[in-house]
Image (spheres, rainbow, N blue to C red):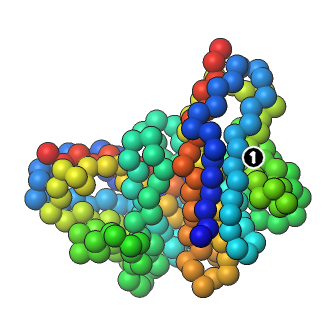
Amino acid sequence: GAVVSQHPSRVICKSGTSVKIECRSLDFQATTMFWYRQFPKKSLMLMATSNEGSKATYEQGVEKDKFLINHASLTLSTLTVTSAHPEDSSFYICSARDIGLAGTQYFGPGTRLTVL
Amino acid sequence: AQSVAQPEDQVNVAEGNPLTVKCTYSVSGNPYLFWYVQYPNRGLQFLLKYITGDNLVKGSYGFEAEFNKSQTSFHLKKPSALVSDSALYFCAVRVLPSSNTGKLIFGQGTTLQVKP
């Protein structure tokens, strides 16, 4: 089955530093990848949609200069949280969609970010 | 506005009994419907989807869901619940036409608790 990996699974950083999270589709090509944020016992909040080779589309209220997204290849997207603050602490989940709008979205295992 | 509703925050069922997790949607256009399951501190796992065709969809781990267009529902069901089915379940809908990115709209999630 389709597998999406995410790295790291857990990261703790100091306030003001930047953190990069990688998302890879391991056995399929993903022209579109998504980044979500999830608060405890809550649903997923879509942050942005990234298409390979083009700029990401951010949801309303998400700062694009703070959450930098790069989708350089059909199997890799990265999310960089710049100048992280404690309020950025959360569970970040990426998702990759296989070919076409009817394709299924597969989710990575998530990254737990804690900013001290 | 397009939305997905999971009216129950939590569903409790005894092991061996049938389970139902409810989902209703409100969209314009033809929906593509999905169910995902999330275990603690993990990403979402795809269970099943409805695109077109037979209204009864069978998915992973013995789960199935029935698309009911007149009631705009897509309830998740399993004939005999297992303790290991205890998790957080999300219903999601993707709406075409492709004037949007085809992003998923998630329900708020339902916690399923299966007791021995």
Evaluate whether residue B59 shows in this view.
no
Evaluate whether residue A85 shows in this view.
yes
* Residue at (77% x, 23% y) in the render: B17
Relative to A48, residue B89 above or below: above
Tell me where residue A67 appears, x and y as whole percent: 28, 68
In the depicted view, which residue is nearer to us: A74 or B68?
A: B68
For the residue labelled by badge 1, is the local secondary structure a helix, a strand or a loop?
strand
- Mark 1 burial class by Cα count in 10 Å: few <14, some 14-19, many 20+: some
In the depicted view, which residue is nearer to us: B101 or A111?
A: B101
Q: Quadrant of the C terminus of chain A?
A: top left
* Residue at (42% x, 55% y) in the render: A93
Tell me where residue B113 appears, x and y as whole percent: 60, 27
Q: Chain of mark 1?
A: B
Q: Is residue B41 left or right of residue B79?
A: left
Tell me where residue B15 appears, x and y as whole percent: 71, 20
Locate residue A12: give its quadrant. top left
Return the residue at label 1: B75
Tell me the amino acid under the disc marked 1: His
What number of labels is visible? 1
Q: Is residue B57 left or right of residue A39?
A: right
* Residue at (45% x, 46% y) in the render: A42
Relative to A26, residue B40 above or below: above
Relative to A88, residue B100 above or below: below
Tell me where residue A14 appears, x and y as whole percent: 11, 50
Furthest toward the top, the residue is B116
